[in-house]
Structures are given as structure tokens and as C-alpha cells.
Amino acid sequence: MENKKAIIKVVSGGYLDILNPDLDLINLEDISIALARLPRYSGQLPEFIDHYSVAEHTCIVYDLAKKDNVDKEVLKAILLHDASEAYMNDLISPIKNLCPEYKEIEDNFTAKIYQKFDVDYGHTKTLVKYYDLLALKAEKQKFWPEDDYYWETLQKLPDIEVFFTFDTWRNAKEKLNVLFFRYFI
């Protein structure tokens, strides 16, 4: 089989192969910068929102779980649940569903990120998904409150109050870095 590579340059200056990553090149600063600059929903948000980043979303998912006193391993997994997007971008779910090979690559790369930071994603996956969906429901209620199209899967989840800051990318990066420092440094 041909030796395929998917190499990108990272903020810290190295070159990372997504298909066969050198774990030493995966770092929290690169992740926080990229996620803070990366808009949720491919930027397809109402005009009243200047910027809503994947980093802010991650902090919201973390806050929801922290409020419920989940264990440290789940909180660590939540902080990394979108980390692959820092390197592979954030493809919206409908596109991911059309591209099973992309999803497989993303899953494999995510496993490497969890390995790098010694997080057991396997036993935390269900809770990570639950809190991610809670945040998704809160986003839907804030951004598109009258829209029921394709949102029926969220109806069984409880309504929760979330405070959105719509931070600048630099502020979102700093908030995420504080959490990274708390759990990984």
C-alpha cells in the first residue's frame, strides 16, 4: 500500500502528519490557538454573533459537566473532545456523515490525542457525548430558537441555562489554556 501522508504545519513550528502523528508535536498551545480561531457551525451563525469558537463551545461543555460534579477523567476527556479539529478543521456533522473515511481518520487521530495526554476516552465517551449534546441544545435555543428542522433529537434533553460570551479568539484561547493548565500541566 502506498505510504500516504497528511502533513500540516502547526503554530508551534513543526510539521504534523495526521495519519501517523508524532505525539511530541501535539501540544495544548497549538490546540487552544486553533480552536479559539475556529468558528462553530462553519461560521453559519445569526448576525448578532460576531464570533463563536470551538474553544468557547469546549469551555461551555466543560462548565456543564463541572456543575454536575463529574469526575476528573471525564472533564479531561471533555477538554479534548474537539481537539482533533485544531488540526483537521471542524467539518459539520452532515458532511462527516457523507465521508466515512474522514470520520475514521478523525477517530484515529483523536485516539492519538487522548493517548498523548493519557486520557481514557473509552469509558468517558458516553458522558462526553451527553454534555456535548447539552451544549448543542443550548446553542440551538440561543441561536435558532424558532427552528425545529433536524433538532428533534435534542428534545429529550433537559433545557439548561448557558451564558455565552462570544469572546474574541484571544480571550477564548486564554480560557481554554487555563483549563488545560489545571488538568494537564
Image (cartoon, helix red, strand yellow):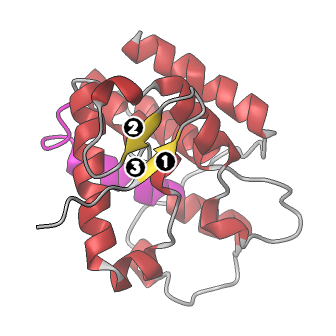
Residue 180 position, x and y percent, is 48, 21
Q: Residue at x 59, y 49 (%)?
A: 54
CA separation in Å, label 1 and label 2: 19 Å
Q: Quadrant of the C terminus?
A: top left
Which one is earlier in the sequence, the residue at label 3 or at label 1? 1
Report the residue marked by disc 3: 131
**Res 3 visible:** yes
Q: Are marks 1 and 2 in contact (CB under 8 Å)?
A: no
Name the amino acid, label 3: Tyr
Which one is earlier in the sequence, the residue at label 1 or at label 2? 1
Q: Of 13 and 143, which appears nearest the observer?
A: 13
CA separation in Å, label 3 and label 2: 13 Å
Mark 2, other Cα within 10 Å: few <14 / some 14–19 / many ≥20: many
Compared with residue 163, is residue 49 higher up or lower down, i.e. above or below? Answer: below
- Give the residues in magenta: 119-135
Q: Of 155 and 103, which appears nearest the observer?
A: 103
Main secondary structure of the magenta stretch: helix
Which one is earlier in the sequence, the residue at label 3 or at label 2? 2
Report the residue marked by disc 2: 80
Question: Hey, which residue is sitting farthest bottom in the picture?
Answer: 149
